[in-house]
Image: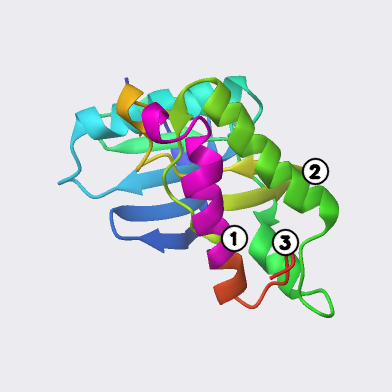
Amino acid sequence: MSIHYEIIKENIAQGKEGCVSVVIANGIACVLKQFKQTKSSARIQREVDFQIQACTEGVAPQVYHVDLDKKQIFMQGLDSLLLDVAKKREPPHLTKYEMDGIENMMVKLDNIGLLHNDGNCRNVMLHQGRLYLIDYGFSKRISKATLRKTNAPNIDYTFKMMKRSFKQNGIKAWNN
């Protein structure tokens, strides 16, 4: 099934596998993640499935519609990158609420057995004061082998990468 939409802001984010635009789809303002045609439909569906699971836990934005033929995901729009908000502060930093919120999202994902697996600080967004984790393209189920190494893979892997990413972007957080 195809969906009719009008582009409001094109290419607000560009990635290796596609771009993100703000659109109006069936009268609803949302975000369109448009993948390159070479992206596997199975991988897009997998990303969507993981995002829906994370959304159920209050960690990810809601998915409204998926068009595997056109390689598109329509989802809830969010206000801003946490990185951009933190950079506007003097000095650039995360608040305790934000640091605790990121850690809490990692714990929630660990609890449902989903490894986010992409610690780029650009994957944390704010919407109406709430934190969300986006981009489930690298996500995977937490394996038994991983659990033999750690019982908190998102904390031990994704969260550590994210802390490093914020620091590399000049954001003071977690006593770095």
Mark 2 or mark 3: whose residue is earlier in sequence: 2
Q: Give the range drawn in magenta.
A: 147-164
Identified at 36% across, 32% down, the residue is 146
Q: Distance between the residues labelled 1 and 2?
A: 23 Å
List the residue tagged with mark 3: 174
Q: How far apart are marks 1 and 3 (CA)?
A: 8 Å
Element marked by disc 1: helix
Q: Do the residues labelled 1 and 3 touch (CB within 8 Å)?
A: yes
Q: Which of 116 and 174 is in front in this view?
A: 174
List the residue tagged with mark 2: 128
Q: In this view, does 79 lie to the left or right of 8?
A: right
Q: Do the residues labelled 1 and 2 touch (CB within 8 Å)?
A: no
Q: How far apart are marks 2 and 3 (CA)?
A: 23 Å
Q: In this view, does 21 lie to the left or right of 43?
A: right
Identified at 74% across, 43% down, the residue is 101
Tell me where residue 136 sits by quadrant: top left
